[in-house]
Image: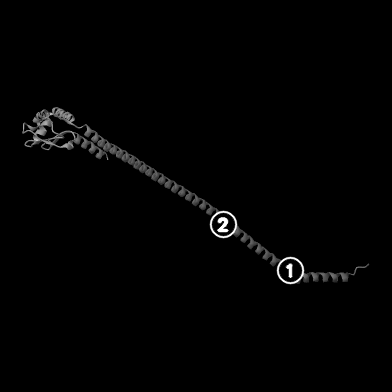
Amino acid sequence: MQLDWSTFFLQTVNFLILVWILRRFLYRPVLEVVARRRAGIEDSLAQAAAAGAKAAALRKDYEQRVAQWEGEREAARARLKDEIDGERARMLAQTQKALAGERERSEALEAQRRDEIRSAMEAEALVLGASFATRLLQRLAGETLDEELVDVMIEDLGAMSDADRQTITDASRGSNVALTCARPLGDAVLDRLRHALEPLTGGASPPEVRVDPSLISGVRVQTGPWVLAANLADELSFFRAGATRAD
């Protein structure tokens, strides 16, 4: 087989022309399209990366804000709990104080009520005692008891201090002496009583004698503003007055 150099040369030229044409009109546009596509892809990738970075930054900021909100919420919850505990403790203290005050008032009222009941019972007992004593003494009253009460007055007059005796004498100077008896007394008893009264009256006129059955038994002597009593009525009156004061 013989090589045809002219044909080989022409085919080589045709191949080079074909390569030039392909490079000129086909390969270069393809490269440009690929370059543009690559640039677009790279730009998209850059935008995606920027968007990803922005999203990451936003996510990080969101997570920080959420963590901050959680911290603020926990702090607010803790403050609210402390305020609630403080208010509960304050209200509990006020309630306990009010209960203690109410308990003290109740105890004071109960003590007062008991004192009033005791006083009322004591007063009633004194009144009943006075009533019983009155009825009993009325049955025991008589001349013998009158004389014994006169002896009691004479004894009291004799035991009186000089200062008291002088006070009564000065206060009753110029006044009449009134002697009241529950019933008429015997002459001997009257004489003894008049003799015991002379130091008080300063030797003035004899006392005026009166009879008052309401005395029950005994005598009452009035000289000036002074009243000397040794009778059951006055004693029972003092007893009743004590009952009234207790009430």
How busy is the neighbourhood of tag 2: few (under 14 within 10 Å), some, or many (20 plus)?
Answer: few
Q: Which residue is mark 2?
A: 62
Residue type marked 1: Val
Question: Which corner quadrant holds the C terminus?
Answer: top left
- Is residue 166 positioned above or below 67 on the image? above
Q: Provide residue 229's location: percent of width, then percent of height.
A: 16, 34
Q: Secondary structure at mark 1?
A: helix
Q: Provide residue 119's location: percent of width, then percent of height.
A: 30, 39
Q: Of label 2 and label 1, which has the lower sequence position?
A: 1
Q: Quadrant of residue 227?
A: top left
Q: Which residue is mark 1?
A: 30
Residue type marked 2: Tyr
Describe the colour scheme in one phrase: one colour
Rounded to the nearest angstrom, the CA distance separating label 2 from label 1 is 46 Å
Q: Provide residue 62's location: percent of width, then percent of height.
A: 56, 57
Residue name at image x 83 percent, y 71 percent: 14
Residue name at image x 55 percent, y 55 percent: 66
Left-right relation of 192 to 44:
left
Left-right relation of 171 to 15:
left
